[in-house]
Image: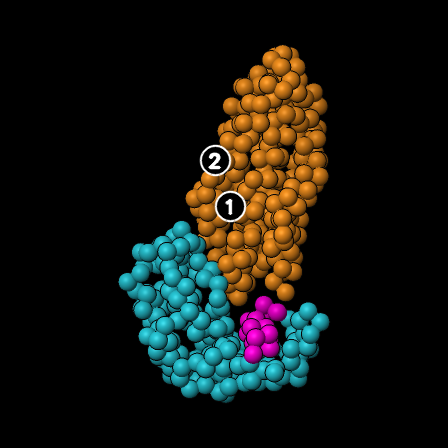
Chain colours: A orange, B cyan
Amino acid sequence: MIGRLVARELRRGFSGPAWLPAAFFLLVATLIPFAVGPDAMLLARIGAGALWIAALTAALLPIERLVEPDRADGVLDQLFVSGVADESVAFAKITGHWLAFGPLLLASAFVGALLLRLPGEQLPSLLSALFVGSLGLAALAVAVAALTAGLPRAGALAGLLLLPLAIPLLIFGAAAAGDSASGALLLECAVSLLLLAGAPFVAGAAIRASRT
Amino acid sequence: MKSLLRFDNVSCRRGGRLLFEGLSLDLDAGDALQVAGPNGSGKSSLIRLAAGLLRADRGKVERVPFAFADDHAALDRELALGEALRFWGGDVTAGMTAVGLADLREVPVRLLSAGQAKRASLARAAASGAPLWLLDEPANALDAPSLERLAALIGDHRARGGAVLAASHVALPGHWRVLELGA
């Protein structure tokens, strides 16, 4: 059932506008030179951080469709009575969400790095950090989506919850493209691992609470 | 014979309001019990308790494997009905045929009427092969021919040794024991 659930999440991710977060990410990356000017040195210096901010804001877009539609339509209840643990549902949602969101984000980051004229030697570390960080971001997004499912103005609330919690990912992710790349990347891995390990339990508990 | 569903001295309180207390019941093979009562009397809560979706404040609920159907279709709206039902497993063809939806196999779920969506949720229960069916308002949105089909479906299920617990604010077609809740 978990495999079917992951496949379902992936299909749902791509049947909606899966390109929207990636397009939003690129749009934000495109706006930065307009805001700070065309100074190539400056763009190269702030590029990694700017791309990370773009990634965080792009991660907000799909949150409302991650859990709430399934709660409202009784899918979560049916999964529970089918014997699927709420934590397993959350894990499947994280996996499916990342598969629909992560690779497109990484492809967009490549284009975004070119737009911001990031030095070529920074690109591998930036993409590595985004790869690792996007896993943590997907976990965080599902947990936040479960916590806010069914609440009024859930979208705004989700943003208020997700962005502060994603600050460690932002700090280490942006630093991973800088001078202390390897140490920051390890810390980024640690934060993502923590989020991946904890998010299914947080989301599972939230799903259970919304049911009762 | 072992009960398919047993409530032992169960109490349920929701939103600070006591819905029922000290409720004991047994559902054996071939039984059909309708939970009746006015709106807000706890019919749906009783079904959700039976399904394990709610926890009893007191008492114990035991059940065998079951299927649960309520007013939520729980089907992917963009998929064809047959494909959407296949996600939940079981004998989908038999389930769809039993509720008269076999012709709508290729129709997207989003295009189903309310009555057809209700029949689709009943088809999932029928397809499951579970011995116990827990149905919340199974007659909602059904027209007269569909009600007859529902009666036949439940009759067949009981004849095969299954049991049904259904909550409904209207009398359900067929022969049912009735448990009246609240006033």
Q: Residue furthest left?
A: B103
Label for residue A96? 1
Lower position in the chain sequence, tag 2 or tag 1: 2
Is B104 situated left or right of A199 in this image? left
- Identify the element where label 2 is drawn: helix
The image quadrant where one finds the C terminus of chain B is bottom right
Q: Does residue B46 belong to the magenta stretch?
A: yes
Residue stretch in magenta: B38-54
User: In this rendering, does residue B119 appear at all?
Assistant: yes
Q: CA distance from mark 2 to mark 1?
A: 15 Å
Q: Is residue A57 above or below residue B122?
A: above
Image location (x, y in percent) of residue B59: 66, 79
The picture places residue B179, in percent across and down from the top left corner, at: 54, 85
Chain letter for the residue marked with disc 1 in the picture: A
Q: Which residue is mark 2?
A: A19
Decide which of A187, B147 is in the foreground and name it.
B147
- Residue drawn at 40 percent across, 51 percent down: B78
Please give the name of the residue rendered at 62% of the width and 35% of the height, measured from the top-left corner. Answer: A56
Residue depicted at x 42% and y 69%: B141
Percent coordinates x, y for residue B20 in the rendering? 64, 80
Looking at the picture, does residue A130 appear above or below residue B66?
above
Left or right for B170, reference A210 = left
Which disc is residue A88 wearing?
none
